[in-house]
Image: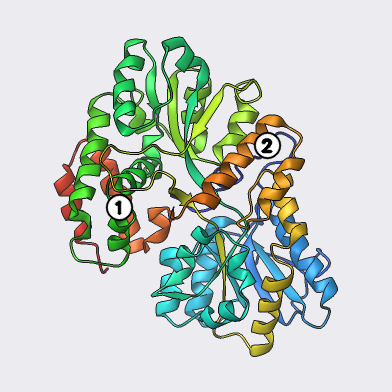
Amino acid sequence: MEPMNTSRRNFLQLVGLGVPVSVALAACGGEPSQTGAGGGSGGGKGVASYWTLSGKPQEDIRKDTIARFNKANPKSKIDITLFANDAYKQKVKTAIGAGKAPTMIWGWGGGGLKSYVDADQVVDLTSWFDENPDLKEKRFPSTLGAATVDGKLYAVPIETVTPIVLYWNKKIFDQVGAEPPQSWGDIMDLVPKFNAKGIAPFSLAGQSLWTNMMWLEFLFDRIGGPDVFQAVFDGEKNAWSNPAALKALGEVQKLVKANGFQKGFQSTVADQNADQALLFTGKAAMMLHGAWTYGSMKADGGDFVTGGNLGYMNFPSVDGGKGDPSDTVGNPGQYVSISSKASKEAQDAAKKLLTTTMLDDTEVQKWIDNGNIAVVKSAGDLISGVSDANDKAWLQFVYDTSSKASVFAQSWDQALPPSQATPLLDNIGKLFQMDISPQQFADNMNKTIGT
């Protein structure tokens, strides 16, 4: 899944909260905005530096946290620099490669973090976590996987969780006389019922490819359990040929052959929210998508959300499968690592921020106020204060799904390095277009392991 596209991450961005705002970087590589202790233009005088993303309302929360820390710690100030998403990825990659990384490196964990570890660019935080047990205790256990490389912790989970969700249109289900699926078999049984009524069983933005990937992520897990993809991530030879993987690939093609998606789904693009529109206008009965789509469906779908017509659930079990249906996939959090090239003074300031101010009660409340569940257990205590009944129910669902999952698997294209993620998406497209068989998919992807 393409990381941190604002429309995908700000899953409860309601009308009136504003649109995503970028800190512009010229194509030739201009300098980003920098915000110092007071929230205005910074002079780079802090003892530590922090690079992260721009975009409302997230950047305001990030800036406020740094400003509050700097006010309380005038001798250990941290300079925050904000980048637009794509510009950030290139800038931080270049800086790390040149040995000039910021003290605090914001990221998505997984494959990107592993590349930093392999290059000895980030600090091993394992013993520091042991010395500060509250860092683990306050966070959802499922967030730590993407912060771990070879059994050691190299990043701190921060900010918010966004699981992938199975949505359905309650009006359409009532119209057809159907019940929400409780198993994969139920899903396949529902397909002909909706098709017979001229309703697409599922909406899918197939051209975007990462949306297709969600189906495989869940089917791999529900059929074979988390170890199936873990073997891929660990680089085991021929891991994609696991029998459970081949079965999952085959089940997806059965769904395609049964006309499980709208006609022309291969040309539908997620960034235009056309897949969401099919659901809330009743042209599709269900949709598998990220939690971030709740806000845009509420904003654009008339009374679809406010009228209580949106249903949602975790992905159901597969009959005979080994996976735990309480597990989920998506974005278990965002992550901060500390540069191994930073001075001890800078590293100490970063660690103090992470233990005192980042994800403190004030920040967690701000995430809730903006419709997000922070990666800490205390977020659940604040849901009761949400006034809108639909939003409250939604936030409770996201909290329960994220906090109760024993495994919160990271989206594959974030977990894997680019050398594997790019061909993965290409082969997923071919699989859904029926251009390759499950075995050909596995053969193609096995060749990428270790690259």
Q: Quadrant of residue 181?
A: top left
Residue carrying label 2: 392
Whether pointer 2 and pointer 1 mark residues with C-beta atoms closer than 8 Å, the reply is no
Query: Which one is earlier in the sequence, the residue at label 2 or at label 1?
Result: 2
Q: Residue at x 66, y 24 (%)?
A: 306
Can you give x and y, in whole percent of width and height, for residue 341 in the image? 56, 86
- Local crowd size for mark 2, using a 10 Å CA cut-off: few (<14), some (14–19), many (≥20): some
| Residue 123 in view, yes or no | no
Q: Amino acid at mark 2?
A: Lys
Can you give x and y, in whole percent of width and height, for residue 72 in the image? 84, 74
Q: Nearer the viewer, residue 432 or 185?
A: 185
Q: Amino acid at mark 1?
A: Leu
Q: Residue at x 73, y 63 (%)?
A: 360
Q: CA distance from mark 2 to mark 1?
A: 37 Å
Residue carrying label 1: 424
| Residue 73 in view, yes or no | yes
Q: Residue furthest bottom?
A: 344
Q: Residue at x 81, y 64 (%)?
A: 40
Q: Residue at x 56, y 79 (%)?
A: 130
Q: Determine whether 435 is above or below 381 in the image.
A: above
Q: Determine whether 202 is above or below 427 in the image.
A: above
Q: Secondary structure at mark 2?
A: helix
Q: Determine whether 62 is above or below 308 in the image.
A: below
Can you give x and y, in whole percent of width and height, for residue 300 in the image? 61, 27
> Which quarter of the rendering shows the C terminus?
bottom left
Left or right: where does residue 429 sit relative to residue 437? right
Can you give x and y, in whole percent of width and height, for residue 70 in the image? 80, 73
Q: Secondary structure at mark 1?
A: helix
